[in-house]
Image (spheres, rainbow, N blue to C red):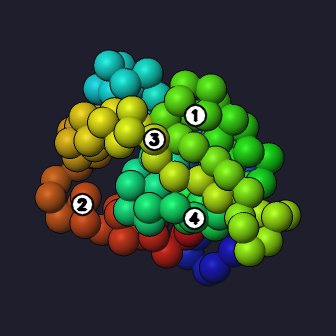
Amino acid sequence: MAAGDDDADDGDYRLEDQVGFLLRCAHQRASSIFQEVMAEGGLTPTQFSALVRLRDADEISQNQLGRLTAMDPATIQGVIRRLVERQLIHRRADPGDKRRTLVRLSPAGRRLTDTVVPHGPVVSERTLAPLSPQEKRVFLALLRRLT
């Protein structure tokens, strides 16, 4: 730890001061607000992310969708399976490479995405409500540096 880090040398480990604990608490807050605001769509945050990326990309590979949404292969596979079951996306084998699966929004998926996307800024605003406008900018910039 750097000189002058008071918490580093005092031997008093406090869970509520640890980055992982604080990030988990912030994530729980954001997830709770997401579920409240997005209740009509019945989507999880990961499903919402996948639908938004598909709206923006049209048709892409399952692997690319996973990368664009920061999900590992097992997670994106489960998300896609659930969205297919809800008939919100279509998937097909890539004609150029049968090992790849292409995914795209179904008409129902596009309608749902168009309905719920406008609520996205509400989730962000409510999540960040305790912060001043300057704190929000700094907080988001710092989070981007960690990702």
Q: Which mark is residue 106?
A: 3
Judging by the rendered image, the residue that carries numbered circle 4 is 60
Q: Earlier in the sequence, mark 2 or mark 3?
A: 3
Which quadrant holds residue 100?
bottom right
Q: Which mark is residue 135?
A: 2
Q: Residue at x 62, y 26 (%)?
A: 85
Q: Nearer the viewer, mark 1 or mark 3?
A: 3
Which quadrant holds residue 124?
top left
Residue type at the position of mark 4? Ile
Q: Is residue 43 above or below residue 66?
A: above
Q: In what element is the residue under mark 1?
A: helix
Q: Earlier in the sequence, mark 3 or mark 4?
A: 4
Q: Which mark is residue 107?
A: none
Q: CA distance from mark 2 to mark 3?
A: 39 Å
Give the image location of residue 2, x and y in percent: 63, 79
Q: Is residue 70 above or below residue 147?
A: above
Q: Are marks 1 and 3 in contact (CB under 8 Å)?
A: no
Q: CA distance from mark 4 to mark 2?
A: 36 Å
Q: CA distance from mark 1 to mark 4?
A: 15 Å
Residue type at the position of mark 2? Glu
Residue type at the position of mark 3? Ser
